[in-house]
Amino acid sequence: MKRITLAAAVALPLLLAAANSALAAKIAVIGTGNVGSALGPEFAALGHTIVYGSRTPTEKDVQDLVAKTGHGATATTQPEAVKGADIVVLAVPGNLAVDITKSLGDLSGKIILDPTNVVNRNTSDGYANHGVPGGSNAELIQAAAPGAPGRTMPANGTVDSSSLAPPVPGIGSTVTSCSWTTNASGTSTPSTRS
């Protein structure tokens, strides 16, 4: 009986560690600005491997972000970051997201998270114009990543990056994420999480 108890005591932490690492993903965070620097460290703290994709991966501010993220985070070019990633987070300006997506290379089988928001502030009436002609930004990103059919999910497009950082002690925070998932037959279904 002692052997079984000892074996269980040794095996349980190993099984839990294996289960946790099996759920962990390699996440390419494309962009190292406000949104990327808010999301990357939080994903890493949850056990995910973070690879930042940056136009300037060796610059001091990018390397400072890698150090702040910890947990083995790295930085490289944007196309290199997506290689081997399970999830790609497009933490870039919304009006550049489609072109950047096209420049990333093969995104087959990857989940693409789109926290972007296209905003035109140069309008004649002085009001910001949200959205893009011809569909949502997520739809345009999906078209730019044909190898990842039905796996582009808009997330937090109307939430300021400061809301994505850790909650204030005693106050907390909730971020609601809404998305549409399109299956291979073209049927879309809504999904909301808080």
Image: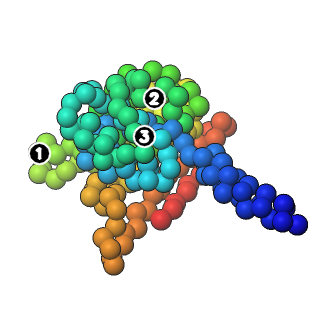
Residue 4 point in image, percent of width and height: 84, 61
Q: Measure how far apart labels 3 and 2 are at the Cα level.
A: 16 Å
Question: Where residue 124 is drawn, which disc sits there?
Answer: 1
Nearer the observer: mark 3 or 2; the answer is 3
Left of 151 or right of it: where is 10?
A: right
- Amino acid type, label 3: Gly
Outermost residue on the front side: it is: 2
Q: Measure how far apart labels 1 and 3 are at the Cα level.
A: 48 Å
- Dot 2: few (<14), some (14–19), or many (≥20) neighbours within 10 Å? many
- Dot 1: few (<14), some (14–19), or many (≥20) neighbours within 10 Å? few
Nearer the observer: mark 1 or 2; the answer is 2
Residue sitting nearer the eye, 73 or 87: 73
Outermost residue on the right side: it is: 1
Number of numbered discs: 3
- Amino acid type, label 1: Ser
Residue shown at the point (34%, 62%) measured from the top left: 166
Left of 163 or right of it: where is 81?
A: right
Residue 114 sits in quarter: top left
Residue shown at the point (51%, 38%) measured from the top left: 26
Nearer the observer: mark 1 or 3; the answer is 3
Q: Earlier in the sequence, mark 3 or mark 2?
A: 3
Numbered disc 3: secondary structure: loop
Note whether residue 30 is visible: no
- Pointer 2: what residue? 82
Residue shown at the point (41%, 35%) measured from the top left: 51
Residue 24 point in image, percent of width and height: 56, 46
Residue 128 point in image, percent of width and height: 19, 50
- Pointer 3: what residue? 72
- Amino acid type, label 2: Val
